[in-house]
Amino acid sequence: ANNKSGRKFLPNMQHISMISDALGQSIRLRLSTNAIRSIEHNGGLDNYLLKLSAADLSPTYRRLRSRIQRKLEGAAA
């Protein structure tokens, strides 16, 4: 018999609060542990989101990215 189990390999998702330096507030996110490591490697949530293109992000993170961009552009002006 060639019986195989129907096992699914799911990502390790975590609920985490991260601080946005630009917005000055804590943001609650649901991220994989791999994404959390990537954010820490890139120097924080703001740098990570600004480094990615908007096409690579979900609508929720796209809105967050645009809020951060507007805040940083307002501070630079």
Image (tube, grey):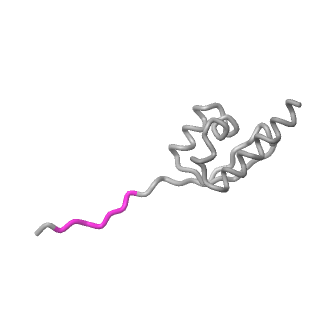
Q: Main secondary structure of the magenta part?
A: loop
Residue 72 percent location from the top left of the image: 81, 36
Residue 22 percent location from the top left of the image: 79, 38
Q: Is residue 2 above or below residue 59?
A: below
- Residue at (57%, 32%) from the top-left corner? 41
Q: Is residue 69 above or below residue 10?
A: above
Left or right of 76 on screen, residue 39: left
- Residue at (63%, 46%) from the top-left corner? 54
Residue 50 percent location from the top left of the image: 67, 37
> Which quarter of the rendered picture does the C terminus lie within?
top right
Residue 29 percent location from the top left of the image: 65, 53
Where does the magenta region start and end?
3-9
> Which quarter of the rendered picture does the N terminus lie within?
bottom left
Residue 18: quarter of image: top right
- Residue at (22%, 65%) from the top-left corner? 4
Q: Residue furthest right?
A: 77
Q: Nearer the viewer, residue 68 or 43?
A: 68
**Is 2 within the magenta?**
no
Left or right of 33 on screen, residue 16: right
Q: Residue furthest left?
A: 1
Q: Nearer the viewer, residue 50 or 19?
A: 50
Q: Residue furthest front?
A: 55
- Residue at (60%, 49%) from the top-left corner? 57
